[in-house]
């Protein structure tokens, strides 16, 4: 099958959606399909895999307290149309088509079997509320809609008045299961781990540092291994900050600690980090958020701590650090759950969606007769 | 007076343009519903065939139920209420043995779930526009029938997993 994927955010900026598109593309290639990904790329010198086609650079636009990166302009529309024409795709798969992004631009300019995956859980998006009616017309062109989580599905039900099938995010289980711990980790005095943006308040690193300070009173040699982009405000004693790391090293980080901590305070649609930790066979302590509760099967595969409560995290981590038996109970449950999220399983379900979208058309993806260039630049 | 005429004329032109645009949009939505309907019909048929061929010889009561439901579903055509009832019965028979179905039948079951959801999505999108006042008052939908959801009990396969 010839599959065209469109990523909404720059390929060279780390993020969950881009990682999803990349892993899906690789898995489909492994299955023997022909895949082309069109993605914005900010750095002109960035090295790209052979299957990635540049879709232009993004323009940062501050909106609603954060920065959206938009890619629009005549050049992009022309590129998208040429890519659709040259690709002769059986199916076009757009990621986050509800955002003002390359995905939406591709939706404007294509017709035929088109599938959209909705990643964001954003119950009160002003952007989406504002754009509801014009977006709705475009969303009508999607033959199949996928939501990666119940929260993401709820968002499109509420904002776009439409529905989606639920296919979760994937994880390369074996990559994490077979990774080697970093040299000298976890060590005999115990180690905690954190993966995520270091300076994004909702990822909760500051909260974890508070919990860590408390834990050091009872576990003076405890260490904390931290990986992710950004600069933390402070770094307590006993904390090792790796900064942004490659995927290979990230997989090793999960293997290098006794307890993986996800102290996020909100805004999580899915919880891919928990699946990665479960695949690595590491015990998890996570905030009691809906998304996390779901992935951890109500606490069966990881301890759920009160959101934003450092004491709750400290006591949960202490209990697990002191009891290998309790960690083993959680990691055994985690291994049983995570196989369902392996990319080989998830991608096979996505291929079923492709087939059902293709079944609604007599031909493949073609460009719209008239170029559409929304006046948003 | 001239200004009033100009305003009325402009509104009339805008109304005509908007009506034409909406009528075209409805055409596309109806075409999508028709295509989704045909795809769902085919997929339901595949499911009945797959269910029947998964039981070459019915031994248990559950297998006999499945064969009866599959035969019944195969006999009904169209996507009316009788089909909904027959496919629901087949879903219940499949659900009863869902932990035992082979992977080929499980795939067909999952694809059927998707096909029905995408069909109903298309119907919902079309109905949203059909219910608009401008569409009803000015008969922008022409003679196209009001699309109907396909309601049935679903049979969801046990989702696959890998050993870790």
Image (cartoon, rainbow, N blue to C red):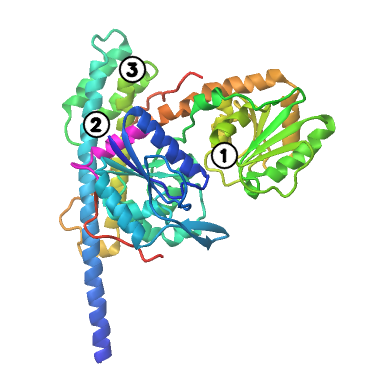
Q: Position of residue A296 (x, y in %)?
A: 57, 30
The magenta stretch is A349-365
Q: Label 3's element?
A: loop
Q: Which residue is mark 3?
A: B102
Count numbered badges in the picture.
Answer: 3
Q: Which mark is residue A271?
A: none
Q: Residue at x 30, y 21 (%)?
A: B104
Disc 2 to disc 1: CB gap under 8 Å: no
Q: Label 2's element?
A: helix
B38 or A347, nearer to the observer: A347
Are the numbered discs 1 and 3 placed on the same chain, yes or no? no
State which quadrant residue A268 falls in. Answer: top right
The correct choice, above or below, for B116 with respect to A324 in the image is below
Q: Which residue is mark 1?
A: A290
B88 or A336, nearer to the observer: A336
Q: Which mark is residue B43?
A: 2
Q: Position of residue A340 (x, y in %)?
A: 47, 26
- Please give left or right for residue B155 compared with residue B15 in the image: right
State which quadrant residue A322 falls in. Answer: top right
C-alpha separation, residue under disc 1 versus residue under disc 3: 33 Å
Q: Estimate how packed mark 1 is, as few (under 14), some (14 to 19) or many (20 or more) residues with alpha carbons within 10 Å.
A: some
Q: Is residue A72 visible?
A: yes
First in sequence, mark 2 or 3: give its number.
2
State which quadrant residue A91 falls in. Answer: top left
Q: Position of residue A44 (x, y in %)?
A: 45, 52
């Amino acid at each position: 099958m010839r599959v065209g994927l469109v990523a909404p955010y720059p390929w060279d900026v780390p993020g969950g959606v881009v990682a999803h598109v990349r892993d899906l593309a690789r898995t489909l290639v492994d299955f023997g399909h022909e895949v082309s990904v069109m993605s914005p790329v900010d750095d002109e010198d960035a090295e790209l895999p052979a299957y990635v086609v540049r879709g232009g650079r993004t323009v940062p636009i501050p909106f609603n307290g954060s920065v959206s990166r938009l890619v629009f302009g005549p050049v992009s529309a022309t590129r998208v149309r040429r890519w659709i024409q040259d690709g002769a795709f059986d199916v076009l798969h757009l990621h986050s088509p509800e955002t003002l992004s390359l995905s939406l631009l591709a939706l404007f300019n294509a017709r035929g079997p088109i599938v959209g995956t909705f990643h964001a859980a954003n119950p009160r998006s002003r952007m989406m509320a504002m754009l509801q009616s014009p977006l709705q017309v475009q969303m009508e062109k999607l033959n199949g809609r996928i939501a990666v989580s119940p929260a993401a599905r709820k968002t499109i039900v509420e904002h776009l008045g439409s529905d989606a099938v639920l296919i979760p995010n994937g994880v390369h289980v074996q990559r994490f299961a077979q990774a080697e711990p970093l040299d000298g980790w976890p060590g005999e005095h115990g180690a905690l781990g954190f993966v995520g943006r270091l300076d994004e308040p909702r990822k909760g690193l500051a909260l974890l540092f508070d919990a860590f300070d408390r834990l050091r009173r009872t576990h003076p040699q405890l260490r904390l291994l931290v990986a992710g982009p950004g600069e933390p405000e402070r770094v307590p004693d006993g904390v090792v900050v790796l900064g942004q790391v490659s995927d290979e090293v990230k997989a090793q980080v999960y293997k290098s600690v006794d307890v993986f901590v996800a102290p996020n305070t909100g805004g999580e649609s899915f919880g891919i980090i928990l699946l990665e930790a479960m695949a690595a066979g590491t015990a998890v302590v996570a905030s009691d958020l809906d998304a996390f509760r779901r992935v951890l099967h109500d606490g069966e595969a990881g301890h759920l701590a009160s959101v934003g409560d450092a004491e709750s995290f400290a006591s949960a981590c202490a209990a697990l650090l002191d009891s290998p038996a309790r960690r083993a109970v959680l990691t055994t449950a985690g291994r049983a759950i995570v196989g369902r999220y392996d990319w080989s399983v998830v991608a096979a379900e996505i291929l079923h969606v492709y087939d059902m979208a293709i079944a609604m058309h007599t031909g493949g993806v073609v460009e719209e007769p008239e170029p559409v260039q929304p006046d948003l630049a | 007076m001239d200004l009033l005429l100009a305003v009325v004329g402009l509104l009339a032109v805008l109304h005509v343009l908007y009506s034409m645009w909406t009528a075209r949009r409805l055409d596309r939505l109806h075409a999508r519903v028709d295509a989704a309907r045909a795809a769902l019909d085919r997929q339901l048929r595949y499911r009945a065939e797959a269910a029947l061929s998964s039981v070459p010889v019915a031994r248990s009561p559950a297998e006999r139920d499945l064969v009866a439901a599959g035969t019944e579903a195969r006999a009904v055509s169209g996507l009316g209420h009788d089909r909904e009832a027959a496919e629901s019965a087949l879903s219940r028979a499949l659900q009863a043995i869902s932990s035992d179905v082979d992977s080929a039948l499980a795939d067909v079951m999952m694809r059927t779930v998707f096909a029905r959801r995408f069909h109903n999505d298309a119907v919902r999108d079309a109905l949203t526009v059909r219910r608009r006042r401008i569409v009803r008052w000015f008969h922008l939908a022409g003679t196209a029938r009001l699309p109907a959801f396909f309601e049935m009990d679903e049979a969801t396969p046990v989702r696959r997993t890998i050993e870790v």
